Amino acid sequence: MQESFISTQHLSVGYSHKKHQYLVQTNLELVLRKGELVCLIGPNGSGKSTLLRSLSGLQNIPDGAVFIRGKNLNRLSRREIAQQIALVLTDRINIENASVHDIVSLGRQPYTNWWGKISDDDSAKVFEAIKTVHLEQKQHRFMHELSDGERQRVMIAKALAQDTAIILLDEPTAHLDLPNRVEIMLLLHRLAHQTKKAILLSTHELDLALQAADKIWLMDNQKGIVGGIPEDLVLNGSFNNVFQNEHYTFNTANGNFSMNYPLDKEATVFGEKTRLYWTLRALARIGYRAVPNAVTQIEITDTSWKTGKQEFRHIENLLNYLS
């Protein structure tokens, strides 16, 4: 079994407001291991960001303990924590006249002297981090000249330059389009496996997390965190328990959420599996549920949809007819 980089005992996390302490999660027993990509998933308000900030020492821990490679977090100095944990928050970095190289170089601060002087070894680590995220051609470009996806890769490079065993990221794919979200998740998966770092990220990208994560920490508003590999959490019903809602259900067949339309009509649908799946999705939008031996029979062929004596080349034409 891989070495434990972060572990918790009876951990409670929360926040203070006007001298009052509010707990959002209690009695958490968590383990983040070497070489793992773990995705933290849960509804808004369940405490994902609070947990990340608590694990990194940015937020006080009301109860319990966090251990970083066996050492109690509360007994480590800020410098020692920064040499073990790199934290990437959702805040956008907009420093005027700061280049990619300048920002990534900030990752070396925990190791520099009080003058902040960058050594040759530091410079080599900075360039290697920039190269890892494929931005070496843009290392002298200013941040404001980059796309959102490139800026996020800069912040990941800064975390890599910090050369820590652990990287924590809060919503690293927020504000990105689909190609960039996929690229960032693939990059983090590759980094965890190739560098043997422990990477924990919070995300709302359930579909990507199910594909990329080695483990998922599924956070519930009331029941704490259930951890495991994605497939086990899908099959044992954990996703449905956490995201249970009258308006949608988690579809264990495909790992997506399905909207709960009012289904007041029935049809029997049969044919090729892929075209059947998309046909059933379309039919649900107009109120049809699939049942055996219905009056309305729909046969799906390789080129058409047939019902009764009617034949259509497109699902749109079928829906118009049934409506």
Image (spheres, grey):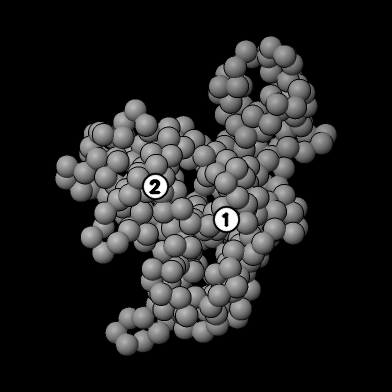
The x and y percentages for residue 167 are 49, 56
Amino acid tagged 2? Asp
- Residue under the point 57% across and 55% down: 198
Front position in the image: 168 or 107 = 107
The residue under label 2 is: 121
Instruction: Name the mark on residue 97.
Output: none
| Residue 193 vertical position relative to residue 237 in the rendered view, above or below | above
Question: What count of labels does the image hold?
Answer: 2
SS category of the residue bearing label 1:
strand
Element at badge 2? helix
Query: Left of 220 or right of it: where is 82?
Result: left
Q: Residue at x 32, y 87 (%)?
A: 19
- Neighbour tally class for label 1: few under 14, some 14-19, many 20 plus, Cα within 10 Å: many
**Residue found at the very far left of the displayed protein:** 96
Q: Position of residue 69 (x, y in %)?
A: 58, 68
Q: Tag 1 or tag 2, which sits nearer the N-term? A: 2
Which quadrant of the figure contains the C terminus?
top right
**Residue 2 position within the rendered picture, expressed as x and y whole percent measured from the top left:** 70, 58
On residue 198, the disc is: 1
